[in-house]
Amino acid sequence: MLSITSIQEIAEVLTGINHPLAPIWIQNDIIKKNIAISFDYWLEDTGIPITLAEFVEQYLAHAEYLGEMFSTGIERDHG
């Protein structure tokens, strides 16, 4: 049976990551739930092994492409 990732697990990972959005995401249950569900689907659909920490880091690295809810707090250079 496939394990279901909890928002608490996502919060624990976020507390260990040094990224400007991590503290913001820790406070947002919708973001944590979205990441948890996406991680579970990733493992089920692809079978490609990745740790939860690596998965969350990828979300943070690409937050600007995930929509306003995820990228709020990112400084953008409109130069």
Image (cartoon, grey):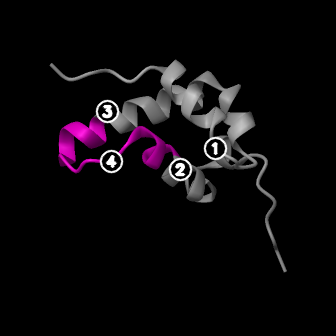
Quickly name the residue at label 3. Answer: 40
Furthest-bottom residue in view? 79
10 relative to 62, above or below: above
Quickly name the residue at label 4. Answer: 50
Answer few, some or many: residues within 10 Å of disc 4's Cα (few below 14, many 20 plus, some between 14 and 19). Answer: few
Residue 54: in magenta span:
yes
Quickly name the residue at label 1. Answer: 17
Q: Amino acid at mark 3?
A: Asp
Contact between labelled residues 1 and 2, with CB atoms less than 8 Å apart: yes
Looking at the figure, which quarter contains the C terminus? bottom right
Query: Which residues, given as a range, are shown in magenta?
Result: 41-56
Q: Position of residue 59 (x, y in %)?
A: 52, 49
Describe residue 49's horizontal placement relative to residue 57 as left or right.
left
Q: Name the residue at 55% across, 34% down.
A: 13
Going from N to C along the chain, the mark reached first, 1 or 3, is 1
**Helix or strand or loop: what does disc 4 sit on?**
loop
> How far apart in space, not on screen, are marks 3 and 4 (Cα)?
11 Å
Going from N to C along the chain, the mark reached first, 4 or 2, is 4
Q: Name the residue at 68% across, 49% down.
A: 71
Residue 61: in magenta span:
no
Answer few, some or many: residues within 10 Å of disc 2's Cα (few below 14, many 20 plus, some between 14 and 19). Answer: some
